[in-house]
Image: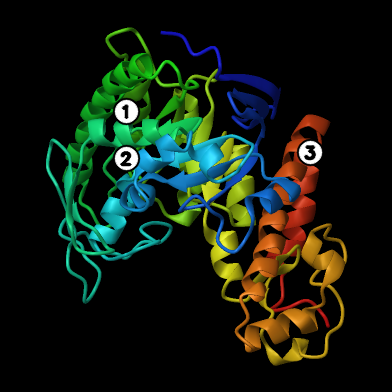
Amino acid sequence: MSAPEFSFKVGTRLEGRHGRSGLISTPHGEIATPAFIPVGTKATVKAVLPETMKEIGAQALLSNAYHLYLQPGSDIVDEAGGLSKFMNWPGPTFTDSGGFQVMSLGVGFKKVLAMESVGVQNDDVIAKGKERLAHVDDDGVTFRSHLDGSRHRFTPEVSMGIQHQLGADVMFAFDELTTLMNTRGYQEDSLERTRLWAQRCLDEHERLTRARSHRPYQALFGVIQGAQYEDLRRKACRDLEALRGAAGTGFDGYGIGGALEKHNLGTIVGWCCAELPESKPRHMLGISEPEDVFVAVENGADTFDCVNPSRVARNAAIYVDRGRFNIDTARFRRDFTPIDETCDCYTCANYTRAYLHHLFKAKEILASTLCTIHNERFTIRLVDRIRESIEGGYFDAYKTEFMGQWQGRVKAPEA
């Protein structure tokens, strides 16, 4: 099988490092990399129109297979013509496998399973006061819906079926998500389970691609686990790169996921990119903080996604080059300047800090809309500038300049 509608071309490389610019081509358009992919979990970036996301420079959006399977149902999205048509988004789309939500909700942690060490190891980890909603076996995962408690079963074949119905340009193989608390022994067992699931995903992907030849080709990315163990990360990369379906299909790209500590991010991405084929794109799952973006890009990540810019915006947290601050604090009550006079987003062009402060205090929905527009634009523009700096040969200078402001940040910019 061939995938003529999906391709990746390497552009400018960072000398002596794995970082590079590039271009991903999909049936719904191109993605210049490095690129930030905003998250529209339920086929929407919360509080913001899809048309607005296009206006602020988003090149692609990522939706969640688990949530869309439960509501409205992947069959409905398929009947609508696929995710792009369903949500009136003209560009490329990504979907994750559903594995993250099955496991994170299953142990009660919701959004966060990584980026900090808890200092203990326990394979039966579960959040305090929570009931385990998901149970893993070698064939798949049985879980109860967080919406109504109904029982469901996800296997590699089920995940592939859901994602093919959703019709995203890029989808991810079903994998087992582990936590920083899992033991080395469990990580090893889980890695082999994920490898076997990846093979089943490739086989089912080939079958469904043939059966759904009337639909545009969907790229399949394998997901690399292995926590913070170098040998396991490298083994996962080699194992996934070697896998082929019955018709000879390999993965179109790779996702770097799983549990890791923030200070090890660059090291782990570097291990993976040293093993992965340079000719295929690499997606870093779940990052968006500026310091993490620079590190991930420098070490070889091409694309990445995260809910954080929109999630913190709904809680009045605003990003500017000098840091993050809360717009609902009293100091902004009479501040009639934009969030950031250097920002080109709709919010900064038309509204003041005082107005945004008022909206949050009045609990108006518009507060979330305007602040999400700004935060998403901030993140997209940052990554655009990183890409320009790579292609222009001044990445290190730009990183030094930006991080000098960001690391010296204060609680809020001067009023």
| Residue designated by label 2 | 226
| Residue designated by label 3 | 389
Give the farthest residue toward the front: 79
Q: Kindly identify which numbered label has been placed on residue 23.
A: none
**Residue in view at x 86 percent, y 65 percent:** 349
Give coordinates of residue 212: x percent, y percent. Answer: 38, 19
Instruction: Quadrant for the C terminus, please.
Output: bottom right
Q: Earlier in the sequence, mark 3 or mark 1?
A: 1
Q: Earlier in the sequence, mark 3 or mark 2?
A: 2
| Residue designated by label 1 | 235
Q: CA distance from mark 2 to mark 1?
A: 8 Å
Q: In this rendering, would 274 be left or right of 343? A: left
For residue 115, above or below residue 322: above
Mark 3 or mark 1, which is nearer to you? Answer: 3
Give coordinates of residue 240: x percent, y percent. Answer: 34, 24
Using the image as rendered, state which of residue 178 and residue 252 is in the foreground: 252
Query: Badge 1, how many Cα within 10 Å: few under 14, some, many 20+?
Result: some
